[in-house]
Image: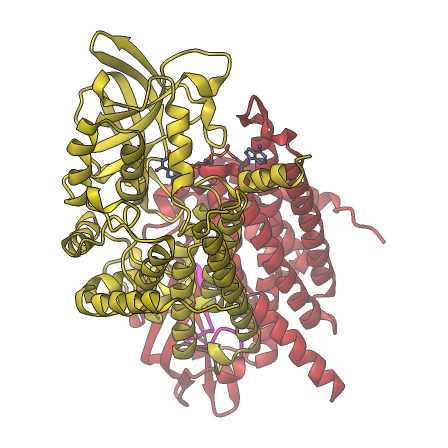
Chain colours: A red, B yellow
Amino acid sequence: MNFERSEDHAMLADMFGRFLQETSTPERRNDTAWTAPFFDQTAWSEMVKLGILGAFVSEDLGGLGGSAEDVSVVFEEIGRALSTDPYLGTLMGLRLLAESGETDLVKQIMAGARRPAFAVFEPEISQDLSLIGTVADEDGKLTGRKSSVYGAPGADLLLIAARNDQGLGLYLIEDVTSVQVLAAPMQDGGGIADLLLEGTQARPLKAASEERIEDVLDLGRIALCAEAVGAMDALVSMTTDYLKQRKQFGRNIASFQALQHRIVDMTMWVEQARSITIRAVASYGTGDQRRHTSMAKNLIGRAAELCAEEAIQLHGGIGMTWEYPGAHYAKRLIMLDHQLGGRHDHAMRLIAMKKENAA
Amino acid sequence: MNLDYSDTEQAFQAEVRAFLAENLPNDLVAKTSSGRELTKEDIERWHAILNARGWLAATWPEEYGGTGWTVVERHIFAEECALAGAPRLLSFGLAMLGPVLIRYGTDEQKAEYLPRILDGRDWWCQGFSEPGAGSDLASLKTRAERDGDHYVINGQKTWTTLGQHANRIFCLVRTSQTAKPQEGISFVLVDLDTPGIEMRPIRLIDGSHEVNEVFFTDVRVPVANIVGAENEGWTVAKYLLTHERTNIAGVGFSARDLDRYHQMATDVRRDGVSLAEHPLYAAQAVELEADLEALRVANLRALARTRDSAASGIDSSLMKIRGTQVRQGILSLYRSALGHAAAPDAESLSDNQIALPPEATRAAPVYFNNRKLSIYGGSNEIQRNIVAKTLFRD
Ligand SMILES: Cc1cc2nc3c(=O)[nH]c(=O)nc-3n(C[C@H](O)[C@H](O)[C@H](O)COP(=O)(O)OP(=O)(O)OC[C@H]3O[C@@H](n4cnc5c(N)ncnc54)[C@H](O)[C@@H]3O)c2cc1C
């Protein structure tokens, strides 16, 4: 048993953390996160040059490893710095392209020449892959509507999950101008889009199966959990600091025991959130992957909500303002539960797994 | 035991319902039921409709143009309005300053200001909080120094709700440096056109412009604008803050929001199930219904105690805490149940075409905005302190 980070991971976290501290500032977020293409293109290029995307890719393809732990180290820093740039879509797209043997595209993405996004869910489908309605004909023409495509605005490779006569297939659109991309910012910043496919020509990819797509989604979920841990950790520190400096009734409000206890509970939940994320990271690629990932996403949904709501409350009016960075951390922590399945979706998935096992 | 309204109360309820069915504009209902922000004109229009019927100032005596209603009638009116989707009334003139003037104002002040609140010529805002004085309001620093027939005001107020629409502000200011901070405060009426006042917007977490900062630099205000005696503003403010208690639990608003939830849950499907049939959301919704029913009866019990004039000091604090918890719980469920559909900020793009159920676009902003409920009006922690003080008093 050893919960220490390896030296490589500590260095990666430190280097990336410092980079984000400089580039992911409230001012830059305000300028970029809610205006098309909803991310900071300059910072993104610099990040690519630093080689961070290597953490998402195995060594034989020129990456740093691409283990769930590598991914979680990067995403924890993303959460801590509240970056809204399109890491999640890039992660999922890279993985599927790598598994499909699209080595050239993988290298181009790692060099910053291209950026992928992955379209799987639909307006009324956010979890159950068996219900996907987008169809592919035998010539690879796609028809349907995709929703919740993270990072799609400005992406130039679109991976699409679509049904064909063998089951669930995976397709690549390299000419994104052939697709209608309906873009918007997310509530907490960053790009999201619907895609309209009307007989759009695409190329089938090899990594096509419900299993593999679910695996990549699980990795995305773990990434979101790690992001939440980073954001929660930062927010609890900010809240603690605020209580120490805010004076009312002639003393620091940190002196009120009622408030101290609330910070204690938040701290407790951060540790639980970190622990369940470590569990999910360690189980990735094993028989426990699905169960532990859903446990993590469920628990994180609850812990993140508690930390976000308490942080706003304990700050008083300040916590309600756009200008205060803590409010945006709180917002991110709430909205995280609206990506790749929320706590209730994952509770349902766990219940379904139990039923399957019993049968 | 009898939970029903009396015959006269029931007749009153029917009258209110009929009035609302006839007079509440559909476009305002559409706005409130989708959680969109109301404009100044929206609020003024609804005020004018109620004023024409003589139903605007629920808490004022009839001689001042109020309704003269009993506490139960006020409760019925507030609940029916909320359920019908009526806009929230602007409390600053109607529920705060009006009663204060009626109790502490001079005859001139009453004659000057009360009619202007009713007919909409004045839009008041509340200048109590300061950057350094929130929960500890008595530590406020904005100074008013006497200079002949005037006070000269210097300082800053903040969190001024809808100040951008207002032409007047009532303020708590320090008129004397005393050992006990409460004793040197005065309550003063200020015209926002007076030179030296600057109002700046504060953007809230949901992006809305609802509150402001107000800066005072050498603002000259006639001495006649003080309400109550000099240095006795704390008594006036306490009266103001504890006066309007009947609607503190916000039962009507919660009931309306829960209705909206049920409607949305029936209409929206995700992953092959209607949200209304999703076991986890459905369980939460029925629990909230139980919570709301308990709150409704607890509120009526508190109301009956007030009516029979044995009002307990802790009732309103407990109602405030529980009322905000229930309302926030409903808005949280509403947001959460929409799942991925609540994520896009579809409103910020005029040409947005993302496919969302219409209810989804405002779910997250409304949820975030209403985190304020447990912070303002005396935070829930401060309310707990008040209750604890009473419960543990020896
Ligand atoms: C949307 C909004 C609208 C508002 N509108 C108005 C308005 O129109 N006019 C106006 O004058 N004011 C207004 N307010 C201000 C509001 O009344 C204050 O925000 C509130 O009193 C809390 O003060 P604060 O924000 O300074 O928080 P603080 O007082 O600094 O409190 C911070 C935290 O400490 C807790 N705390 C403080 N003291 C204690 C204690 N003794 N024991 C335990 N916990 C404690 C609080 O509960 C809170 O959780 C508004 C606020 C908001 C958010």
Would residue A120 be counted in the magenta stretch? yes
Q: Is A62 positioned to the left or the right of A279 in the image?
A: left
Could you say where residue A316 lies in the image, as x and y percent from the top left? 49, 38
- Residue B367, placed above or below residue A133: above
Is residue B376 visible to us here?
A: yes
Q: Position of residue A313 (x, y in %)?
A: 52, 43
Left or right? Give the position of A273 relative to A132: right
**Image vertical order of residue A253 relative to residue B56, above or below:** above
Determine which quarter of the picture holds residue B83.
bottom left
State whether the magenta stretch is mostly helix, strand or loop.
loop
Q: Is residue B192 visible?
A: no
The magenta span reads: A112-127
Against A171, residue A16 (above or below) is: above
- In the image shown, does A355 or A191 lie closer to the viewer? A355
Nearer to the camera, A267 or A3? A267
Is the residue A194 above or below the residue A227 in the image?
below
Q: Residue at x 45, y 49 (%)?
A: B306
B106 left or right of A187 in image: left
Q: Residue furthest top?
A: B148
- Residue B394 highlighted magenta (yes or no): no
Q: Is A176 in front, or is A188?
A: A188
Q: Position of residue B200 (x, y in %)?
A: 28, 31
Q: Residue furthest right?
A: A1
Q: Position of residue A350 (x, y in %)?
A: 66, 74
Residue shown at 16%/33% (left/top)?
B111
Res. A256 image quadrant: top right
